[in-house]
């Protein structure tokens, strides 16, 4: 599977980085994870025709993860997309996502492509609940040879460890350093140290870090070092628009 990050920031954007979202490509299947920034522009830059995008996963309703959904749907409609698009999430997020689209009267557009609103599971993608301040889903995607798990926004969560056991790569949020763990955990977030601990317990090979507070958005060396205290595998702070093979 190919993994391409479009942004690795948490809620606050910076001059050179933006809210976390990424693309997974597995053969013919393309999956966009969360709708922030400029999804169509990102897909074009990544070499994926937006009219062929198969699946959008929405992890939760916090603004930085969902605000670009209306823009994505509007762009695809203007581009005369014909292929159905599956949008996967938990029940609450699906409801809010539909409300957001309804604000812009998008779902009643003439000749709008079919949108399949899918709860929790679709084929090789399985969502699971994590510990955040609103109903939030992490997910696992399996291919014939490997699996990737994404924590989404969460404090350290047993379910993430369980799901990531046997997976090759874990994408885990690391909002800030261990110095702020109390504040982070009470807001449903994790430190770099805790992301490393989760990866070590799950036994994955590679840990991708993301969802950084702005002071770590452009230099996450400190968070990588923290993650490496308990995790012996490879820790990656994703370079934007670089393709990672998992
Ligand atoms: Zn959140």
Image (tube, helix red, strand yellow):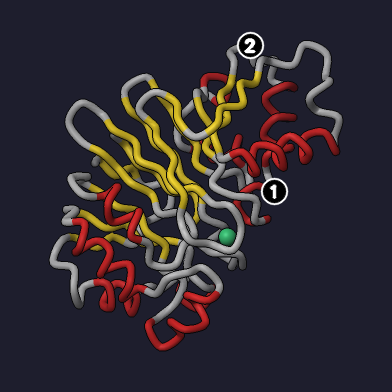
Left/right of residue 33 with respect to residue 191 in the rendered view: right
Residue 82's disc is: 2
Tell me what residue is drawn at x 47 percent, y 28 percent.
Answer: 48
Locate the C terminus and report the quarter of the image it occupies: top left
Q: Nearer the viewer, residue 26 or 91?
A: 91
Label 1, on which residue? Answer: 67
User: Which numbered disc, 2 or 1, marks the residue that appears first in the sequence?
Assistant: 1
Q: Quadrant of residue 88?
A: top right
Question: Within the displayed image, which quadrant is ligand 1 positioned in?
Answer: bottom right
| Residue closest to the eye, 219 or 72 | 72
In the structure shown, which secondary structural element does the residue marked by tag 1 occupy?
loop
Question: Horizontally, is 78 left or right of 4 in the view?
Answer: right
Instruction: Give the vertical position of 147 relative to 86 (above or below).
Output: below
Q: Is residue 197 left or right of residue 218?
A: left
Residue 190 image offset from top left, x and y in percent: 42, 71
Residue 160 in picture, x, y percent from top left? 34, 54
Local packing at callout 2 (Cα closer than 10 Å; few below 14, some 14-19, many 20+) is: some
């Amino acid at each position: 599977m190919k993994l391409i990050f479009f942004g690795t920031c948490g809620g606050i954007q910076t001059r050179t980085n933006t809210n976390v979202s990424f693309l997974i490509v597995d053969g013919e299947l393309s999956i966009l994870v969360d709708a922030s920034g400029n999804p169509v522009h990102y897909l074009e830059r990544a070499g994926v025709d937006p009219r062929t995008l198969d699946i959008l996963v929405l992890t939760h309703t916090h603004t930085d993860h969902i605000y670009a959904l209306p823009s994505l749907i509007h762009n695809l409609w203007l581009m005369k997309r014909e292929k159905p698009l599956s949008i996967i999430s938990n029940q609450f997020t699906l409801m809010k996502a539909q409300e957001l689209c309804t604000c812009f009267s998008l779902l009643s557009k003439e000749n709008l492509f079919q949108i399949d609103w899918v709860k929790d599971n679709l084929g090789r993608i399985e969502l699971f609940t994590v510990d955040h301040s609103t109903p939030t889903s992490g997910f696992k995607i399996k291919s014939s040879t490997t699996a990737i798990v994404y924590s989404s926004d969460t404090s350290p969560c047993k379910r993430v460890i369980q799901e990531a056991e046997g997976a090759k790569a874990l994408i885990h949020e690391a909002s800030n350093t261990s110095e702020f763990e109390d504040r982070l955990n009470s807001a449903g977030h994790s430190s770099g140290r805790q992301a490393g601990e989760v990866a070590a317990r799950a036994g994955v090979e590679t840990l991708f870090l993301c969802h950084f507070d702005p002071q770590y958005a452009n230099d996450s060396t400190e968070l990588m070092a923290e993650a490496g205290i308990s995790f012996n595998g490879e820790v990656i702070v994703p370079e934007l628009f670089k393709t990672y093979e998992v």
